[in-house]
């Protein structure tokens, strides 16, 4: 009876641990292990989060946009006036690919922790012609993105050990 009771008490703890859906892949050139979320659809684009032992890379794709090193993304958090600004850290492209990266350090950068602890209501991208494209997230997308970011933060720490 004690064992059954213990299983019922621990069941909720294990049910939350299953939400971390990341794939582990090996880079064909550097043979370094990476973890990735894969491409996930948003309202008007897609995003992916990849992590190596040295960095965490956020990639967004938006159809028909050109980004260069002066392009920016402003991330707005729900319920606050707080926002985070990121500059494109990827190469100049007209494929609609926007990157911003963080170093995989312990403890994590404050801006990265904010992404994982606060719900993102919208992201505004400025392309190379200073035209803004806004991506608004639904409640489900906000929660899913926040969970994936927290998951990637936790899993990326294991890569550097």
Image: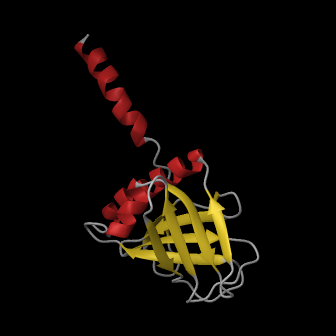
35 above or below 98? above
Residue occupying image coordinates x 58% and y 84%: 71
How many labels were placed on the picture? 0
99 horizontally vs 18: left or right:
right
113 horizontally vs 44: left or right:
left
Residue 121 visible in rendering: yes
Residue 152 visible in rendering: no
Q: Nearer the viewer, residue 11 or 34?
A: 11
Q: Nearer the viewer, residue 42 or 103?
A: 42
Residue 153 place in picture, x, y as percent: 37, 60
Residue projecting furthest to the front: 81
Q: Nearer the viewer, residue 42 or 157?
A: 42
Residue projecting furthest to the right: 64
User: Would you identify the image quadrant in which residue 137 lies?
Assistant: bottom right
Q: Nearer the viewer, residue 41 or 68?
A: 68
Residue 24 place in picture, x, y as percent: 48, 61
User: Would you identify the image quadrant in which residue 44 lies?
Assistant: bottom right
Instruction: State which quarter of the image contains the C terminus.
Output: bottom left
Residue occupying image coordinates x 72% and y 79%: 65
59 horizontally vs 127: left or right:
left
Residue 113 place in picture, x, y as percent: 35, 62
Residue projecting furthest to the top: 1
Instruction: State which quarter of the image contains the N terminus.
Output: top left
17 above or below 110? above
Residue occupying image coordinates x 56% and y 89%: 70
5 above or below 63? above
Residue 151 place in picture, x, y as percent: 41, 54
Residue occupying image coordinates x 54% and y 82%: 88
């Amino acid at each position: 009876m004690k064992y059954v009771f213990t299983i019922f008490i621990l069941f909720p703890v294990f049910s939350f641990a299953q939400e971390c859906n990341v794939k582990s892949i090996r880079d064909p050139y550097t043979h370094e292990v990476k973890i990735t979320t894969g491409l996930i659809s948003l309202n008007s684009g897609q995003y992916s989060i990849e992590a190596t032992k040295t960095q965490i890379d956020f990639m967004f794709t938006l159809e028909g946009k050109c980004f260069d090193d002066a392009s920016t993304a402003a991330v707005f958090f729900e319920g606050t006036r707080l926002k985070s600004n990121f500059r494109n850290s990827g190469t100049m492209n007209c494929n609609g690919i926007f990157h911003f990266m963080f170093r995989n350090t312990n403890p994590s950068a404050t801006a990265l922790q904010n992404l994982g602890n606060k719900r993102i209501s919208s992201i505004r991208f400025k392309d190379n012609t200073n035209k803004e494209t806004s991506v608004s997230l639904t409640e489900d997308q906000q929660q899913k993105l926040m969970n994936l970011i927290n998951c990637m933060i936790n899993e990326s720490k294991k890569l550097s050990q």
